[in-house]
Amino acid sequence: MKTFADQKLPGEKVVLTFDFTSALNPTETLTGTAQVSVTVRSGNDTNPLGLLNGSASADQTGKLLLVPVQGGNDSTDYVITAIAQTTNAFKSPGLSGVLSVRA
């Protein structure tokens, strides 16, 4: 599981990057709509999906998934999981990461 390098402030808006490069063959790219879920790893948040700030989207290379987030509760760690569709109908890779929110 990836740990995002920087902590996020509760009032801050940031874009998280999920790198699917190693899960894709050179001719494959991300496509369609990714499924993104958010759960609380530690701390307290009754609405962890409120962390999402819009839809996830692939970057111009088609290898990175960009997930906009906002808010979150102080002293809470969130697990963000993204399952992406690809140009290969038989492949939907997933990645998870931990985002810490600290004031």
Image (cartoon, grey):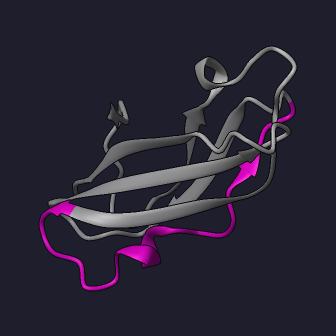
Figure quadrant of residue 58: top right
The front one of 89 and 53 is 89
Figure quadrant of residue 44: bottom left
Q: Is residue 15 magenta?
A: no
Figure quadrant of residue 2: top left
Residue at 87% in and 19% down: 27
**Residue 5 at x, y percent in the picture:** 35, 30
Q: Is residue 52 magenta?
A: yes
The reply, left or right, for residue 3 in relation to residue 50 is left
The front one of 43 and 7 is 43
Q: How many marks?
A: 0
Classify 11 as above or below 34: below
- Magenta-colored span: 41-60
Quadrant where the image shows the C terminus = bottom left
**Residue 60 at x, y percent in the picture:** 87, 33
**Residue 100 at x, y percent in the picture:** 26, 50
The front one of 12 and 23 is 23
The reply, left or right, for residue 95 in relation to residue 2 is right
Return the residue found at the far top. 26
Give the overall secondary structure of the magenta segment.
loop
Residue at 85% in and 39% down: 87
Residue at 59% in and 69% down: 53
Residue at 25% in and 85% down: 46
**Residue 75 at x, y percent in the picture:** 14, 60
Classify 40 as above or below 4: below
The reply, left or right, for residue 41 in relation to residue 31 is left
The reply, left or right, for residue 74 in relation to residue 27 is left
Classify 78 as above or below 16: below
Quadrant where the image shows the N terminus = top left
